Image (cartoon, rainbow, N blue to C red):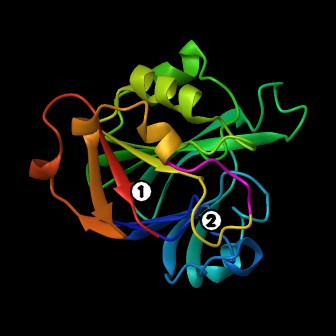
Amino acid sequence: MRIRWHGHSCFEIEGSVKVVTDPHDGRSLGIPPPNVKADLVLVSHDHFDHNCVTVVKKPDSSVIDKPIMTVEKGVRVEGIEASHDDHGGAKRGGITIFRFELDGTSFCHLGDLGHQLSDDLVDRITGCDFLFVPVGDVFTIGPEVAKKVVDRVGPKVAIPMHYRTPGLSLALKPVESFLALCKREQVVKVGNEVEFTAEDMPKSGTEVWIFSP
């Protein structure tokens, strides 16, 4: 399998099909647009930096943008309601957390999560192999809460997203603010994309994979 980062919260997960999360148009953020066509597109919420489906969509692509439990393109998907802020969505509305399984590997994309996870949400997410977690603060949870989320969920691999990168027009915190809370031996730099098999996954604990723009 392969994971490729297209900047911000947009990832391409490729196995028997291609899944793309939270596509942006690039131009509005000051970074390159995603260069991929997806079989399945997951959209956590309807904000301009997460919902540009037309950039990655094919004529036969499936798009999921709401809480639902379904199987699309052979991918088992569970959409879970959450909030974009710590006031129950009163400030920025709701989001959908997506937990999905592709070719026997489980992923959870937290979108623009804006609050600490409830015990119920932790229970529904725990057991995932990969956890994509926002760490940039301002519009989402920040480094400290993100670290608590990772520790509570305990994925095999945590992948930080939604943080400041060169050219990005949003004033977010850099990933280093999150990494400062992690143990050095946890952190693995993987470049812009990484191919992996089940044998490459950590046997215990959580690794933090850092992607480069």
Please tell me how crowded label 1 is: few (under 14), some (14-19), or many (20+) other residues with Cα within 10 Å. some
Identified at 47% across, 70% down, the residue is 213
Q: Is residue 211 left or right of residue 67?
A: left
Q: Position of residue 77 (x, y in %)?
A: 49, 48
Q: Position of residue 62 (x, y in %)?
A: 58, 69
Q: Nearer the viewer, residue 187 or 197?
A: 187
The answer to which image quadrant residue 97 occupies is top right
Instruction: Report helix, strand or loop for mark 2.
Output: strand
- Which label was assigned to residue 63? 2
Q: With respect to residue 67, does 54 lie above or below?
A: below
Residue 177: give x, y in percent of width and height.
52, 40
Q: CA distance from mark 1 to mark 2?
A: 12 Å
The crowd level at tag 2 (other Cα within 10 Å; few <14, some 14-19, many 20+) is: some
> What residue lies at 39% left-to-right and 61% top-to-bottom?
211
Residue placed at 37% from the left, 54% from the top? 210
Indicate yes or no whether the magenta region holds residue 173: yes
Q: Is residue 109 visible?
A: no
Amino acid type, mark 1: Val
Boundaries of the magenta span: 170-175
Horizontally, residue 143 falls left or right of residue 66, namely left
Main SS category, magenta section: loop
- Reading the chain from its start, which is encountered first: label 1 or label 2? 2
> Mark 1 touching mark 2, by CB under 8 A?
no
Residue to which mark 1 is pinned: 75
Q: Is residue 95 magenta?
A: no
